[in-house]
Image (spheres, grey):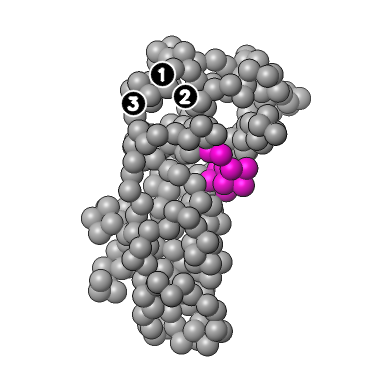
């Protein structure tokens, strides 16, 4: 792939067209190498300065040397680290079988890549989760979301463009958060195959809740503020679910 085309991968339409996304920085590429979900072929673009550090790369990677100027044009950061990988997009297996020990987290039209990256990081930390994203959600393979995930996206099954109707035909029961719900510390909170979380501003659409067998739960607080950040709420729920399986 020409470098001019590689630069285009910062845009979603070209990621979809070419079937690749970009991973920038030494930490993320080392995390990619540890991923059981990594797809090949991976091409890594490196500067001579970075190569001189002697960092070991997976011998299955194709390594391409570029100039500092070329690296600056490929990077979307102010201070490029000198290493960027072009990675195949994973196959989007909608309706893939869910493992017996796996819970699904469904995000409806999440918009903030930082929030999404933090959620990915929390779910990968606790383990045993699959992330489902609705249509019109932020792309988890854009560079901001990948960086915010700190490599967690390489360790977590992610399904894209899962509609509410597909979700309803796939699962019989759901849980979601609401101020009037039961406490997430209740025993029944851990007994659902799928947990619904809505857009940062609008929440889960009311029609989706009325059309499904969904039960409300709440994260207890002191009531001094209106709500929790979405990423914080998902992280707290993931912790509670992880504790329930111990």
* Element on which disc 1 rests: helix
Q: Which mark is residue 166?
A: 3
Q: Position of residue 51 (x, y in %)?
A: 49, 84
The residue shown at (36%, 51%) is: 90
- Alpha-carbon distance for marks 3 and 2? 15 Å
Would you identify the image quadrant in which residue 179 lies? top right
Quick one: label 1, few (<14), some, or many (20+) residues within 10 Å? some
Q: Nearer the viewer, mark 3 or mark 2?
A: 3
Read off the magenta span: 119-129
Q: Position of residue 61 (x, y in %)?
A: 40, 72
Would residue 124 appear left or right of 96 to someone viewing this image? right
* Element on which disc 2 rests: loop
- Alpha-carbon distance for marks 1 and 3? 12 Å
| Residue 176 visible | no
- Alpha-carbon distance for marks 1 and 2? 7 Å
Instruction: Using the image, determine if residue 213 lies above or below residue 197.
Output: above
What residue is pinned by disc 1? Answer: 208
N-terminal of the pair, mark 1 or mark 3, is: 3
Q: Position of residue 5 (x, y in %)?
A: 26, 68
Would residue 130 appear left or right of 159 to someone viewing this image? right
Q: Magenta includes 174?
A: no
The residue shown at (68%, 29%) is: 244
């Amino acid at each position: 792939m020409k470098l001019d085309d590689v630069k285009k991968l910062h845009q979603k339409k070209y990621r979809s067209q070419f079937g690749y996304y970009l991973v920038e920085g030494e930490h993320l590429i080392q995390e990619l190498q540890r991923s059981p979900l990594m797809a090949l072929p991976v091409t890594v673009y490196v500067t001579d300065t970075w190569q001189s550090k002697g960092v070991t790369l997976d011998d299955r990677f194709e390594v391409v040397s570029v100039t500092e100027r070329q690296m600056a044009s490929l990077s979307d950061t102010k201070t490029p680290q000198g290493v960027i990988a072009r990675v195949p997009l994973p196959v989007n297996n909608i309706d893939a079988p869910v493992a017996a020990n796996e819970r699904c987290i469904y995000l409806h039209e999440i918009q903030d890549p930082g929030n999404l990256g933090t959620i990915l990081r929390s779910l990968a930390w606790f383990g045993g989760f699959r992330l489902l994203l609705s249509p019109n959600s932020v792309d988890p393979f854009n560079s901001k979301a990948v960086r915010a995930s700190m490599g967690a996206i390489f360790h977590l099954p992610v399904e894209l463009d899962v509609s509410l109707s597909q979700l309803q035909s796939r699962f019989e029961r759901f849980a979601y958060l609401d101020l009037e719900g039961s406490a997430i510390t209740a025993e029944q909170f851990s007994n659902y195959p799928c947990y619904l979380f809505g857009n940062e501003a609008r929440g889960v659409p009311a029609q989706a809740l009325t059309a499904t067998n969904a039960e409300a739960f709440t994260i207890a607080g002191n009531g001094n503020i209106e709500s929790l950040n979405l990423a914080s709420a998902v992280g707290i729920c993931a912790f509670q679910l992880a504790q329930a399986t111990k």
